Image (tube, coloured by chain):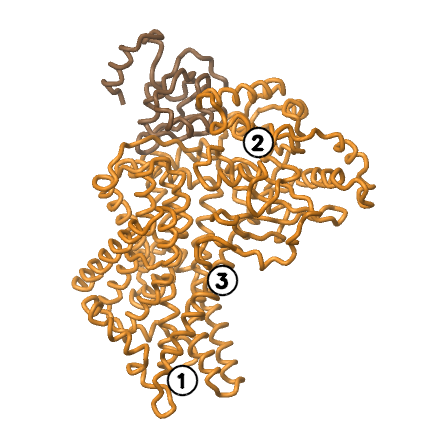
Amino acid sequence: MEDPHTRTLLRELPEPAPETELRLLDVPLREVVELVRIDLPSDELEPLLERGILPGCLLCPLRYSPSGDPIVRVDGSLLALRRETAGCLCVRRGVLPVH
Amino acid sequence: MSTPVPAGIEPVAGDASNGGYIPEDPDDQLLVALIGPPNSGKTTLFNKLTGLRQKVANYPGVTVEKHLGIVRLPDGRDVRLVDLPGVSGFSARSADERITRDVLEGRAAGLEAPDAMVLVVDATRLETQLLLVEPIMELGLPTLLVLNVADELEARNGRLNDQVLGEQFGVEVTRTNARSGRGVDAVREFIASVADAEHPDGSEASSRDSSGAARSDRREPRSRELRNVSHRSSLPLIDVFATRRRIVQGAVAAADYSPAGPSRLTERLDSIFLHRVMGPVCFVVLAVLVFQAIFTWAVPLMDGVELVVAGSGEWLAANLPASWFRDLLIDGVWAGVGSVLVFLPQILILFLFLGILEDSGYMARAAVIADRMMYRVGLQGRAFLPLLSAYACAVPAILSARTVADDRDRLATMFVAPFMTCSARLPVYALLIAAFIPEKPILGPLLGTRAATLLGLYLLGAVAAVSTAFLLKRTLLRGKRSGFVMELPPYRIPSLRTLGLRLVDRSRIFLRRVGRIILAVAIVLWILLQFPRVGGEPPPIDDSALGRTGQLIEPAIAPLGFNWKIGVGLVSSLAAREVIVGTLGTIYGVEDTDETSIQLQAALKRDLDLGGAVALLVFFVFALQCMSTVAVMRRETAGWRWPALQFSYMLALAWVGAFIANRLI
């Protein structure tokens, strides 16, 4: 799951502090995090935005599918993401769990 | 109907002439639109409100179904209710999204702008669902916001002040449980109050003066255009949605909203159905169950249909005076149409299971399990749903491939969709399997040889689809891989009423096909079997016009183990796959005029050995015998290049596959 390439990219990012920003894929199950940024070209954004995945929303990875793709709770809805997509979601830790 | 798609294909699920009860000039009748995100319970509510007083037609020029129903108000007045396609966005990527947008903005051909809206959202997923429908509430039409399954919100420790939420958006709010029917009367009352406001002078309005007066001061529509949608905004996409989210969050915060806790049932079921080991096992077991049921459950029903067809044929034969008309009716029409009709129970069982799997929420989990394979092949996750719907029919599948954003991915999806086993293949498979594969248990009562063969044929089609997509994505349609996001709806017990109405719909479609294409083919074939006359009598079947034509193509199919009769069946099945069953029914009906009951299986065994039967099955797995599919491909790709390539590729694969099968067995 730890992609060395992603790690390098993260370290090169100027802001915010790399140690507090991580990808959704690195978040342990059942921890609530806040979405900071989506690293996807704009033509691939809309399906995510329509389902409530936009900066500021709270995400909570619940489980992995048999093939290792994360199932995430967003505002009470369950969403299945490809792990490649989840790897493009930059999140922030330290949010109080809502439930 | 002016759809460019030939009549009789699946998505043309009805036509304007068959209702009668819905006035063609509806100026004086109110139109209410029912709108909501997918899986919000919208269709269940529609069925509750209209019952059987509904009909399905197409919007002119597009193959999107228009579900129109009549709501009978308590005082006897009728109001039209249109069930719009589930809203999953307004970007107009799909024909569904475009139609919803056009109807709301009053620009849809074939339907005027609605007078009022009933907006259905799932209360347990309020924020996400409101985010989708927020632009609709801004239209300012009289709107009732229906919070479906609100009882579950409370049961899972959620909380909401309905009245404040309504004030925030300027709409009325009510709670329902569409499945149990709770709160549906409030929806009727809302519609009645709108009707009163529209015709305040009507005598029938007097009983509702109070609520009617409340409505008469309703705001004029603020705008006839959807705002806060990406295609109309100069803002970056992300800001458009951020605006919508801000509005929704402000409103739910004011309404003291606290979301529902996680659903225990959904968590528990997901821990099984999405389990690393149990998930795929359940997937396979469910598939096996469906196929076994198609064979075992259907038997008594099929016997019943067969009895009715054979009995009515015998009765007609005994009671009609001997004439060419009687022969046409009994040997041509009854034998041809009847032999296809027998398969209605199997098709209904298939759709019953598909309906249960879909309405219960399992189908989305199945999509998640299958998605990794789609990714390896190089297809988008969005291609899964079109391909899944191709199990019913390739035509709507090809149309819904519009939801696949990337053009190359979309083409690949459309190209492989006809490999998925559509319901028109089922009668052919069922007939040949029942005739040639003896039933033996493999896994006790769970799986028999016949169901296993059927499962194998479905798998073969899926493998052909996947490998073809793999090939295309590495040659003609090279492109990048992309993401996938899919909503997993909460598990729910499917509504019996919705399942039932779905089966009624399916039966209508099947019977219409039988009544049109198969009837026509049966009549033409019967005539071709009567000439040239020999001494005023019909010729021996090998010397008939049909026999001679069939013998012309025999050299091409003899290596596959087929004789000319099967060849004629293959040619006639170019119109639609299940026609081959009717064709063989007619040929054997004329051949064995003394037999009134349909002994199709026995007759087939004279013309095919096991190798030939397996070859024929394999041929049907691969070949693109469906003119509707070719037509819709031509329209969607704006040219003959892709449908021609698709047709030849699939035909070549079918011939080679059948040849190998015939040699091996």
- Chain identifier, colour orange: B
Picture coordinates of residue B164 (x, y %)?
Answer: 66, 22
Q: Name the amino acid type tagged 2.
A: Glu
As helix, strand or loop, the secondary structure at mark 2 comes to loop
Q: How many other residues sit within 10 Å of disc 2, few (<14), some (14-19) or many (≥20)?
A: some
| B486 relative position to B646: left or right | right
Query: Which mark is first along the chain, 2 or 3?
Result: 2
Residue shown at 25% from the left, 58% from the top = B651
Q: Chain of mark 3?
A: B
Q: Please state which of the two labelled residues, at mark 1 or mark 2, is closer to the viewer.
A: 2
Q: Is residue B489 above or below residue B112?
A: above
Question: Which residue is depicted at the point 33% across and 49% down?
Answer: B639
Kindly identify which residue carries mark 2: B225
Q: Are marks 1 and 2 in contact (CB under 8 Å)?
A: no
Residue A28 in view in this figure: no
User: Where in the figure is residue B613, as x and y percent of width and height?
Assistant: 26, 66
Cα distance between the residues tagged 3 and 2: 39 Å
Front in this rendered view, residue A78 or B636: B636
Colour given to chain A in the rendered image: brown
Which mark is first along the chain, 3 or 1?
Answer: 3
Estimate the spatial distance between the alpha carbons at disc 1 and disc 3, rounded to whole Å. Answer: 29 Å
Estimate how packed mark 1 is, as few (under 14), some (14 to 19) or many (20 or more) residues with alpha carbons within 10 Å.
Answer: few
For the N terminus of chain A, the quadrant is top left
- Mark 1 lies on residue: B594
Circle nearer the viewer, 3 or 2: 2
Residue drawn at x 79%, y 33% is B213
Q: Is residue B172 left or right of residue B482?
A: right
Which label's residue is closer to the chain start, 1 or 2? 2
Q: Which residue is mark 3?
A: B512
User: Does residue B490 lie above or below B319 as drawn?
Assistant: above
Q: Quadrant of residue B555?
A: bottom left
